[in-house]
Image: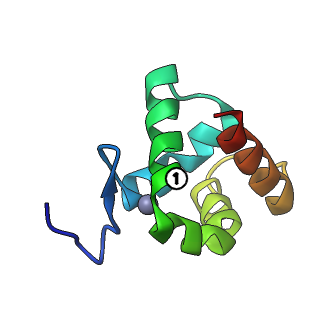
Amino acid sequence: MSTDAEKGRLVAGLWCTDVLAGLPDFVDGELSEAEAAAVRAHLDGCDWCERFGGAYSGVVARLRSDGPAREEAPDITAKLLGRISEG
Ligand SMILES: [Zn+2]
């Protein structure tokens, strides 16, 4: 298994880029249980995403820019962290 700097790392069957792309749905609880579990497992075991954490809110905001973005970025980050800790 090789790592690709552009995609991040492959952890728990997901690339970092896949995880980041799915974060809005993850935060909104729109992923299936299996998908959400995979995202949690990835974030749990991926220090690349952990280091990237500070940028989550910006990434999420950008991904959501084509839809109604009613929530403040810090709130999204808090919800995301809450979901991760739900374990
Ligand atoms: Zn990652």
Viewer-nearest residue: 50 or 23? 50
Question: What residue is drawn where x is 56% and y is 74%?
Answer: 51
Query: Residue 9 location in percent, x, y?
Result: 32, 64
Quadrant including the N terminus? bottom left
Query: Residue 87 location in percent, x, y?
Result: 63, 34
Viewer-nearest residue: 5 or 44? 44
Residue 54 placement: quadrant: bottom right
Q: Is residue 24 visible?
A: yes
- Determine whether the beta carbon of the residue marked 1 sits less than 8 angstroms from the nearest atom of ligand 1: yes
Residue positioned most to the bottom: 5
Question: What residue is drawn where x is 85% and y is 53%?
Answer: 75
Query: Residue 3 location in percent, x, y?
Result: 22, 70
| 74 over 58 or under it: above or below | above
Viewer-nearest residue: 75 or 68? 75
Q: Quadrant of ligand 1?
A: bottom left
Q: Is residue 68 visible?
A: no
Query: Residue 6 location in percent, x, y?
Result: 30, 75
64 lies left or right of 16: right
Question: What residue is drawn where x is 70% and y is 33%?
Answer: 86
Identified by mark 1, the residue type is: Leu
79 lies left or right of 46: right
| 61 over 18 or under it: above or below | below
| 25 over 14 or under it: above or below | above
* Residue highlighted by disc 1: 43
